[in-house]
Image (tube, grey):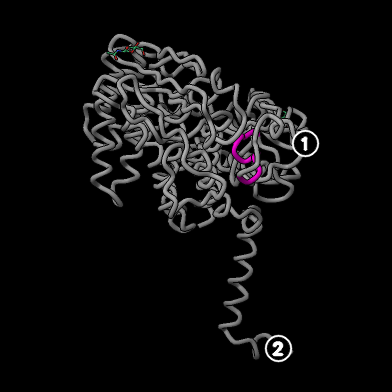
Amino acid sequence: MNVCKTHLPLKNFLFILGLAFYLAEVKATPSKGIYDYGDVLHKSILFYEALRSGDIPEATNRIPYRGDSALDDQGFYGEDLTGGWYDGINHVKHGLPMASSVINLAWGMIQYKDAYVDAGAWEYGLESIKWATDYFIKCHTAPDEFYYQVGTKQLDSTHWGRPEEMDMPRPPEMVNTTVPGSDVAGQTAAALAASSIAFQTEDPAYSTTLLEHSKQLFTFANTYRGLYPGTDYSSSDYGDDLCLAACWLYYATNDEIYIEEAENMYNEFQLHKSTWAYYYNDFKPAVQILLYQYTQNAKYYESFTEYLDKWLRNGSVPYTPKGLAYLSTWGALRYAANTAFLALVAADLGANPVTYRDFAKTQIRYMLGDCGHSYVVGYGVNPPERPKHEASSCDDMPSICDFTDYQSPDPSPQILYGALVGGPDINDNWIDDRTNSKTNKVACDYNAGFQSAVAGMLQMLR
Ligand SMILES: *[C@@H]1O[C@H](CO)[C@@H](O)[C@H](O)[C@H]1NC(C)=O
Ligand SMILES: *[C@@H]1O[C@H](CO)[C@@H](O)[C@H](O)[C@H]1NC(C)=O
């Protein structure tokens, strides 16, 4: 007898066939459904909201333990420098990591807009970067003038507590024609150009404003060349920053002048040279990827694949037993996340797509729980509870918050949702210790490549 043939309607047969294909698909993509990348994306955006300095709009503030702070931040001549993000580990507003964060965030939003929109995170993402770009515009007080920092690490180190209660001096620091800073001004120009693309549809007027500031900053950075005098975050080169700005200006304007400039700078500054890590101090791999995207020239492809390949198993970057590509005891997760993001973008351009996506997936999954627990505050299994972050270590007002809270072995009273902490040692060991900067530091630039890689993961599952 043949029951199936006579009694199973074609519709059911097709349904079962479809289910079989669906299950095969799930099996081929084991990450599907295990981690909620949309949730992680939302939480990472919340982390940036927790870093907000300045006048916080009460109606939309989603961080209950945060309010207005540093409302007196100003330039040498009284210019309003309120706003922007605190660095994370302290309450200084550092231009270099802030700009690099905006570059990586805006790039991820441009590349994975569909994922952001699907997750209902697009508007939040725009608001998030706007907090930083509004501040950059304030800091750009004249065509050839840019305030790259407010506060110093040293003055800040005397205080542990709420930013709302700070009383130490917060001096401004500027680059201009006599004290140039092609690195920080170039990186900010790149951040503004990339952001202008993200805002093109929703807010064309703001997009144009961002682009104008970007062009002026790029000209300033390129005309008055030199390394910025900042010491808290140092920069060893400015060629990569200038070239990156030219790349993003080309992306934003389609003006051939910028691609010519970018290719000339690539040669002038020897930007094919090898890179230790992709982070605020080295944008060479980003430049190589963008120039390949625009020109399809194989020389750029060779350079960025050389960088990415060293991160693969059997490359020169060592792996922990549980599978994290481990570059440095300081913020190991940040380096792996940044490179995971680049690997996803490279894969989108057709570069070793299976291998590079698989690399990114294993790294991001490690951070979200594959290693045995989550490294993202407020997300997943057994996440960090003691990030090195001042505001979230404080009880609700009006309790006193000071170094006692820093030293406290207790979990932080507030949850710093979405923050990616520094990470483990090379053997996957990690202790949830607020006083340990290597393991528990959080920072605006730690989350940026990570957030964009998470958006890329979400895009893959669409
Ligand atoms: C240029 O920047 C330097 C270093 O920050 C500063 O000392 C100087 O006052 C600035 N020049 C002007 C005209 O503001
Ligand atoms: C790494 O190298 C070893 C030894 O050459 C080889 O057996 C292994 O398959 C390689 N692994 C990968 C992921 O390429």
Q: Is residue 390 magenta?
A: yes
| 195 on left or right of 233 | left
Q: Residue furthest top?
A: 178
Mark 1 vs 2, N-terminal side: 2
Q: Is residue 137 magenta?
A: no
Q: What residue did someone put label 2 on?
A: 3
Q: Amino acid at mark 1?
A: Pro
- Residue at 43 percent of width and 24 percent of height: 150
Helix, strand or loop at mark 2: helix
- Residue at 28 percent of width and 26 percent of height: 141
Q: What residue did someone put label 1 on?
A: 409
Local crowd size for mark 2, using a 10 Å CA cut-off: few (<14), some (14–19), many (≥20): few
Is any atom of residue 32 visible in this view? yes
Is any atom of residue 452 visible in this view? no
Residue 425's place in the image compared with 353, above or below, is above
Task: Find the magenta span and give its range.
Answer: 388-397
